[in-house]
Image (cartoon, helix red, strand yellow):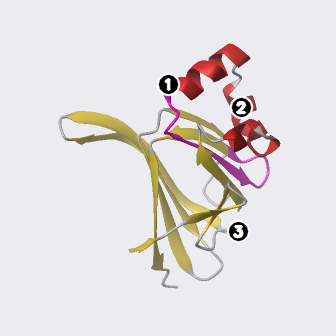
């Protein structure tokens, strides 16, 4: 796999690789041991329209909410920002906060405790949605052989 440098458009839209209209190939979530501690990681493999498999590795997942996520679900967009960034309080992250069902006091506590973490929202087909809070994201890709 080749590492992909990603960026944010408009301060929140994940860019740098093709994922729009890609389909989810695999979804793995679990504990990873290292350096005397454990963390939870999420790996999502997406087959894009350019015959590549994109791997999104979300490390140090603190919160994860998933609805209707299936192999073959179509990806429309990813929104991502640091929790300390004011954009996470705007409408682009409305689904993130709704999925957590947090009141304003919980939101303030979450922002103060995890300000350097990334808030991530996946928008997909047929009710597919994913919201998570993680320490970091790495992206890689590989050609898909037919």
- Mark 1 nearby-residue class (10 Å; few <14, some 14–19, many ≥20): few
Horizontally, residue 9 falls left or right of residue 28, namely right
Label 2 residue SS: helix
Camera-nearest label, 3 or 1: 1
Camera-nearest label, 2 or 1: 1
Q: Residue at x 73, y 41 (%)?
A: 93
Q: Nearer the viewer, residue 18 or 31?
A: 18
Q: Which disc, if any, is residue 97?
A: 2
Q: Nearer the viewer, residue 61 or 90?
A: 90
Q: Is residue 68 visible?
A: no
- Mark toward the start of the polypeptide (2 vs 3): 3
The answer for how far apart the CA atoms under marks 2 and 3 are is 23 Å
Question: What residue does disc 1 label?
Answer: 113
Q: Is residue 69 one of those drawn in magenta?
A: no
- Residue 68 appears in which quarter of the rendering? top right
- Mark toward the start of the polypeptide (2 vs 1): 2
Part of the protein shown in magenta: 113-129
- Mark 2 nearby-residue class (10 Å; few <14, some 14–19, many ≥20): some
Q: Which disc, if any, is residue 20?
A: 3
Horizontally, residue 138 falls left or right of residue 101, namely left
Evaluate if marks 2 and 3 touch, with contact meaning CB atoms under 8 Å apart. Answer: no
Camera-nearest label, 2 or 3: 2
Q: Is residue 127 visible?
A: yes
Q: Residue at x 24, y 33 (%)?
A: 37
The answer for how far apart the CA atoms under marks 2 and 1 are is 16 Å
């Amino acid at each position: 796999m080749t590492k992909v440098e990603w960026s944010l458009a408009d301060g929140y839209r994940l860019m740098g690789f093709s994922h729009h209209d890609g389909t989810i190939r695999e979804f793995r979530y679990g504990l990873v041991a290292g350096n005397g501690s454990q963390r939870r990681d999420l790996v999502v493999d997406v087959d894009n329209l350019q015959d590549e498999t994109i791997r999104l590795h979300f490390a140090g997942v603190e919160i994860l909410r998933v609805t209707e996520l299936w192999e073959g679900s179509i990806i429309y967009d990813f929104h991502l920002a640091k929790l300390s960034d004011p954009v996470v309080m705007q409408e682009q992250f409305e689904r993130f906060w709704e999925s957590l069902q947090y009141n304003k006091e919980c939101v303030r506590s979450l922002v103060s405790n995890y300000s350097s973490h990334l808030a991530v929202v996946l928008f997909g087909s047929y009710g597919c949605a994913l919201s998570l809070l993680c320490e970091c994201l790495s992206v890689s890709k590989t050609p898909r052989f037919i």
